[in-house]
Amino acid sequence: MASKDVMILTGAGQIGMAIARRVGYGKKIFVGDKRLENARAVARTMNDAGFDVTPLEMDLSSRASIRSFIAAAQNAGEISILVNAVGVSPSQASIETILKVDLYGTAALLEEVGNVIAPGGVGVTISSQSGHRMPQLTAEEDALLACTPAEALLTLDILQPGRIRDTLHAYQMAKRCNEKRVMAEAVRWGKRGARINSISPGIIVTPLAIDEFNGPRGDFYKNMFANCPAGRPGTADEVANVAELLLGEKGAFITGADFLIDGGATASYFYGPLKP
Ligand SMILES: NC(=O)c1ccc[n+]([C@@H]2O[C@H](COP(=O)([O-])OP(=O)(O)OC[C@H]3O[C@@H](n4cnc5c(N)ncnc54)[C@H](O)[C@@H]3O)[C@@H](O)[C@H]2O)c1
C-alpha cells in the first residue's frame, strides 16, 4: 500500500479536532498537545471513527518540543498538512504564558514546519477575532511582529510587561502577531510551493470559550454573541467549513490571508450595538 499523506495537528481541542475530522480521512495524522490526555482523547474518538491518529505530547512554547514532534511525524513520511489549533485564552493563563504559547509558539511552529513542508503542502493556524478588535498598530510595529525571528520576538519593546496592560491585551497582540506571521511565512512557504493561512474565529463553543463564559469577562462574552448579527456563538464545525476551503484544492489561490468567522461580532463592535 502506498504511504499516506502526513498531517500534523497541534492542539487537541474542539476546533482542531473538527478540522482534522473534515480533512484528515485517509491521512496519517499526528496530534500533539501539552496535555497528553487531550491528544489521546482526540485520537481515541477519531480512531473509533476510522481515522489513523497517533497522539503525542508536545509543548508549543518550546522549540525543542516542536522539533521532536515534527521529527516523529516525519518518520511516517513528508508532512503535507499543518493544522495549528493550540491556544490559551485570557481567562486561562498569565500574560507571560499567553505570549509564550500563542505568540512565540505559533511563530516558532510556522518557522519549523515551513522548513520541511512538502511541495504543494498547506497549513492553517487558528488566530482570533481578538486580533481584529484592538486598535491598529503602526506599520513598523506590524512589520516587527511579522518578520522578527521567532527567537527574538519576546524581546520586542511592544511586548514588554510595562507595555502589555492585561491578559486580554496579551491575547490580542498574540493573535495580531499570528496574522502578520502568516503573511510573512506565506512568502517563505511559497518558495516550496506551499500555502499557509489563518482563521480568526469569534466565539466558538469549546472548553476554552466556556472558561471565558465562566471567567471575569463572562458577561462581556455573552453580550457579544447576543448582540452580534448572528445572535449566537459559533461551532467548531463551522470553523472547519472555512478550513476545508483553505486546505483544499479550491483554496489554491489563497495564501497569506486571514479569515474572520465571528457571526459579525467585529462588524458590530466597530459599527453596531457592540461598539464600546
Ligand atoms: N473557542 C473560541 O471561542 C475561540 C475564539 C477565537 C480563537 N480561538 C482559538 O482557537 C484555538 C483553539 O481553541 P479551542 O477553543 O479549540 O480550545 P481548546 O481549549 O478546546 O483547545 C486548546 C488546546 O490547546 C492545548 N494547549 C494549551 N497550551 C498548550 C501548549 N503550550 N502546547 C500544546 N498544547 C497546548 C490545550 O491543552 C487544549 O487541548 C486557540 O488558538 C484559540 O485561541 C478560540
Image (tube, rainbow, N blue to C red):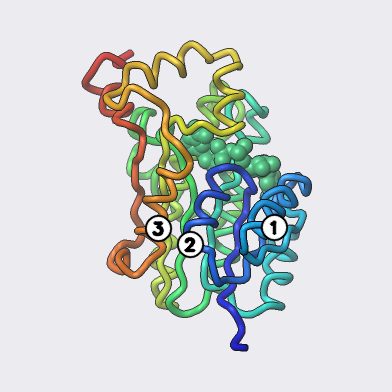
Check residue 63 in the rendering and tell me which mark sits there, or answer none.
1
Q: Which of 161 and 191 is in front in this view?
A: 191
Q: What residue type is labelled 3?
A: Glu
Question: Does residue 224 appear in this view?
Answer: yes
Q: Position of residue 178 (x, y in %)?
A: 47, 47
Q: In which quarter of the image is the N terminus?
A: bottom right
Q: Which of marks 3 and 2 is nearer the N terminus?
A: 2
Q: How far is disc 3 from disc 1 in space, using C-alphas? A: 28 Å
98 displayed left or right of 15? right
Cβ of mark 3 under 8 A from ligand 1: no
Residue hosting label 2 = 23
Q: Earlier in the sequence, mark 1 or mark 2?
A: 2
Q: What residue type is labelled 1?
A: Arg
Check residue 244 in the rendering and tell me which mark sits there, or answer none.
3
Instruction: Tell whether label 2 touches label 3 (CB within 8 Å).
Output: yes
Question: Does residue 173 appear in this view?
Answer: no
Q: Nearer the viewer, residue 80 or 184?
A: 80
Q: Which amino acid does label 2 sit on?
A: Val
Q: Where is residue 135 in the image (x, y as percent from the top left)?
A: 35, 28
Q: Residue at point 59% right, 72% down?
A: 6
From this viewpoint, which residue is outermost toward the left? 271
Q: Residue at point 45% right, 16% down?
A: 222
Q: How far is disc 3 from disc 2 in space, using C-alphas? A: 6 Å
SS label for mark 1: helix
Name the mark nearer the viewer: 1 or 2: 2
Name the mark nearer the viewer: 3 or 1: 3
Label 2 neighbour load within 10 Å: few <14, some 14-19, many 20+:
some
SS label for mark 3: helix
Q: Residue at point 44% right, 62% down?
A: 185
From this view, report whether residue 230 is shown above or below residue 183: above
10 displayed left or right of 193? right
Label 3 neighbour load within 10 Å: few <14, some 14-19, many 20+:
some
